[in-house]
Amino acid sequence: MPTTRINDPRLAPAYSTAEAAQYLRMPPETLRSWIAGRIYTVAGHPKRSAPLIRLDDPKKQFLSFLNLVEAHILAAIRRRHNIGLPNVRKALAYVKRDFHIDRPLIDQAFQTDGLDLFVERYGELINASQDGQRAMKEMIGVYLKRIDRDSKGLPIRLFPFTRDSQSESAPATDPRIVVLNPAVSFGRPAITGTGIPVQAVYERYKAGDSVVDLAHDFRLEISAVEEAIRAA
């Protein structure tokens, strides 16, 4: 499925590594290794592995919204299993080859048959049990459900996790109050359905405004204000 389109904001260089890592609640160094590759040594000579995420930015400096979504899905694969990147790369290449898709992590086909194929291949590479493969599929599924897609199956909105996403249990109950939409607030976190930037709420909270006052001024539910502060 093609992902290139003239003036598509989803492809625009938008997020620094540090900024994207903050939204995805992960170490910047980890994300940097995904987009730039890792340096390793062979016979005393430094080598760099191929990146897992190919940046849409021609200058290879910033992540696009689609790159951010790719990192979001990759986090589901890597975060709870501590599996070597070469095995991730092999499994994704397997799906890419069999489904003839350029970017498996964001293609809608990955969400159906592609996910089964990936988990099966991944399980073989890491000797995962059937229960382990089932748990992996459930975990990735939780992350996939945080993505809204357009009529062509491409991501248009990402609802990042705003609570603990480091534990072994899938954060399936995280509310969808904060959203990243490349067509709203320049792709920065905003409150769903309002376009109100999370940062605007947080700055006033830091300045001393109470949650109740913020809810009144922005015409938001208190829970939405609390989630915006948590996300920031």
Image: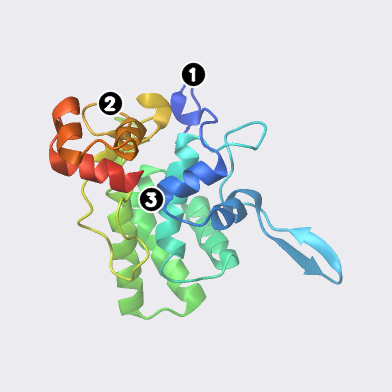
Residue 219 shows in this picture = no
In this rendering, would 134 be left or right of 4?
left
Q: Measured from the top left, where is residue 162 in percent x and y?
A: 31, 50
Amino acid at dot 2:
Gly
Give the mark nearest the N terminus, 2 or 1: 1
How would you rate the neighbour count of disc 1 (Cα within 10 Å): few for under 14, some for 14-19, many for 20 or more? Answer: few
Q: Measured from the top left, where is residue 186 in percent x and y?
A: 42, 25
Figure quadrant of the N terminus? top left
What residue is rendered at 21% in x and 29% in y? 193
Q: Secondary structure at mark 3?
A: helix
Q: Secondary structure at mark 1?
A: loop
What residue is rendered at 46% in x and 68% in y? 122
* Residue at which label 2 appears: 195
Classify 72 as above or below 63.
Answer: below
Name the mark nearer the viewer: 2 or 1: 2
Q: Nearer the viewer, residue 96 or 9?
A: 9
* Residue at which label 1 appears: 7
Q: Measured from the top left, where is residue 201 in percent x and y?
A: 29, 33
Figure quadrant of the C terminus? top left
* Residue at which label 3 appears: 110
In this rendering, would 17 be left or right of 78?
right
Give the mark nearest the N terminus, 2 or 3: 3
Q: Measured from the top left, where is residue 34 in percent x and y?
A: 58, 53
Give the mark nearest the N terminus, 3 or 1: 1
Q: How far, Cα to Cα, is label 2 from label 3?
A: 30 Å
Classify 177 as above or below 94.
Answer: above
Amino acid at dot 3:
Phe
Q: How far, Cα to Cα, is label 2 from label 1?
A: 21 Å
